[in-house]
Image: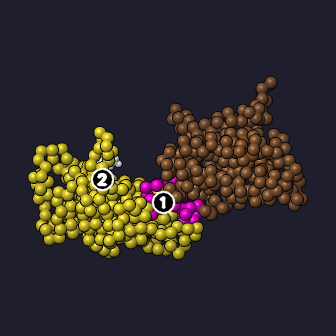
Chain colours: A yellow, B brown
Amino acid sequence: MIVLDEYTKYFHRGSINEVIALKDFSLNVKNGDFITIIGSNGAGKSTLLNGIAGVFLPDSGKITLNDTNITNWPEHRRAAFIGRVFQDPLLGTCGALSIEQNMAIAAKRGKHRGLSIGVKSKHRKCFQAELKKLDLGLEDRLHDKVGLLSGGQRQALTLLMASLVRPNLLLLDEHTAALDPKTANQILDLTKEIIEKENLTTLMVTHNMNQALQFGNRLIMLHQGKTLLDVKAEEKQKLTVENLISKFYASQGDNFASDRMVLI
Amino acid sequence: MTLYSFIGAVEQGFVYGIMALGVYITFRVLDFPDLTVDGSLPLGASVSAVAITHGVNPYLSLLLASGAGFLAGMVTAILNTKLKILHLLASILTMIALYSVNIRIIGGPNLSLLGAETVIDSFSKTGVAAYYAAPIAFAVIAVLITVLIIWFLHTELGLAMLATGNNPKMITSLGVNTHFIIILGVSCSNALVAVSGALVAQNQGAADVNMGVGTIVAGLASVIVGETVFGNRTILQACFAVLLGSVLYRLAIALALGIEWGAFSFTPSDLNLITSILVITALTAPMIKEKITAI
Ligand SMILES: Nc1ncnc2c1ncn2[C@@H]1O[C@H](COP(=O)(O)OP(=O)(O)OP(=O)(O)O)[C@@H](O)[C@H]1O
Ligand SMILES: [Mg+2]
């Protein structure tokens, strides 16, 4: 469905701070794939998701969506088919606006925005029904400012908003990392539920290897802007955390000990 | 304060309140500090005055003024979004350029409208006393514009504008072109400011290229005073707070100008100083209050 072809992205190209965040990176995501992505800090995971979403354009390479070349599409145009949840719970929602206003904005993702009233009364019922599924009591707080909600509540709302209009592709970048373990698990269950129900094609970045093994049908390990490991289906089911660590270790050698990955 | 100066202050409050609403859109809704207004206020005045002296209907001249203000705002917003110039600097550049442009439009530093038919005349024809005509006319126009803004901020596009100022990353990921929204918002804001300038010119019977000095500070003062006194919990509340804040601000100025200590009294040229002090006080009041209660 979405295909990256030798995608390369530099930061600060030409200066002494130059980093190459993704190196001739190729990836073929099939419809219905749920891919978990792991890798050490600075491996290029966020760059990959941002690159697909169109936050920046590549230095070279190509992205195609269902055979349409979207390499030069700006972010807001790609948003028509992409739903996103960020690591920072504050980023995915608008704190100054109410829950229903946020949902109304999300309900228009990829559609024309005109001069009709933003929050229509016929939508409120639907918003309430959706919020009820979260089981957080938000359905009775439609008029509350989102800024009043907790990080977990905001992240749950963001997830709901990302899937309010069915996205062809869902991008999750460590979306539970800022939450306490209990809330993180709730959000993760919710994530799974939504993805399975809607059969969403998903890329999920995580630092938790167990999560990466438990979820999805394909696992990719990134390192220094390249794919270190790419396992699918049955092969993935046989994989263990020890496997992952040793595979990583084998290709890395000694600088591994300083990595955050070893802690998990 | 005499009744005469009270009515005068209310009149000024409403007519400059339209400008303050424009400042509210850039400053509060879009989080875009826009100094273009110091140039777009006299721009509106100039365009309207020139149009009226050429026989254009005064209401139509308001439309022309708003169009000119819209374009001025568009220049600032394009400098910022497309050419990546910092918003403050972009707006200062437009403001400075407008000074020259305004002199070109007028063909000199000022233009008298004495004897010409104005918007206020059509209100005095309805039979209200002459000195009530202008405040009533401005109050009606300002309230209509306030209602229009409140309505707009509740539309799909208006929600996108609110979100653009609050969380541009989120609204982009939901499919909104923030550049377009910023250009639209800053342009509309300056259109309002230009209309305000046009009405001021029609009221005082002249357009002057220097009449824009301090506009942004007065606008900010109105927004901040209004929010502090009347609150801003909902959009409706915030918009009317800005309009009433403008009236309150002009009353405060009139009051200050009336103060006499022996031989000392304020002159109209002290207005900018008083305004700055007022804005600083309003901005720091919450902080100072906190400090005092902490002691
Ligand atoms: N906006 C940016 N400007 C400059 N360099 C950047 C920027 N974003 C990422 N980088 C660099 O690109 C490389 C890849 O970063 P990226 O954020 O993709 O890593 P990551 O895999 O998401 O790491 P983490 O696990 O810490 O989130 C890093 O070296 C990083 O310093
Ligand atoms: Mg990251």
Q: Residues within 10 Å of mark 2 (few under 14, many from 20)?
A: many
Q: Is residue A48 above or below residue B270?
A: below
The answer to whether dots 2 and 1 both sit on one chain is: no
Tag 1: amino acid: Asn
Q: Residue at x 55, y 73 (%)?
A: A121
From the top left corner, tell me how far across and down residue A63 is, in percent.
31, 63
From the top left corner, tell me how far across and down residue B237 is, in percent.
63, 56
What segment carries the magenta color? B153-177
Q: Residue at x 54, y 71 (%)?
A: A120
Q: Is mark 1 within 8 Å of ligand 1?
A: no
Q: Is mark 2 within 8 Å of ligand 1?
A: yes
Picture mark count: 2
Q: Nearer the viewer, mark 2 or mark 1?
A: 2
Residue under label 2: A9
Whether residue B275 is visible here, answered yes or no, is: yes
Q: Residue at x 32, y 67 (%)?
A: A64
From the top left corner, tell me how far across and down residue A183 is, in percent.
32, 59
Q: Is residue B79 toward the left or the right of residue A57 in the image?
A: right
Q: Is residue A252 toward the left or the right of residue B74 in the image?
A: left
Q: Is residue B259 above or below residue A60?
A: above
Q: Which numbered circle lies on residue B177?
A: 1
Magenta span main SS: helix
Element at label 1: loop
Name, please, the residue furthest toward the top.
B263
From the top left corner, tell me how far across and down residue B62 is, in percent.
73, 56
Residue closest to the eye, B42 or A216: B42
Residue closest to the eye, A138 or A226: A226
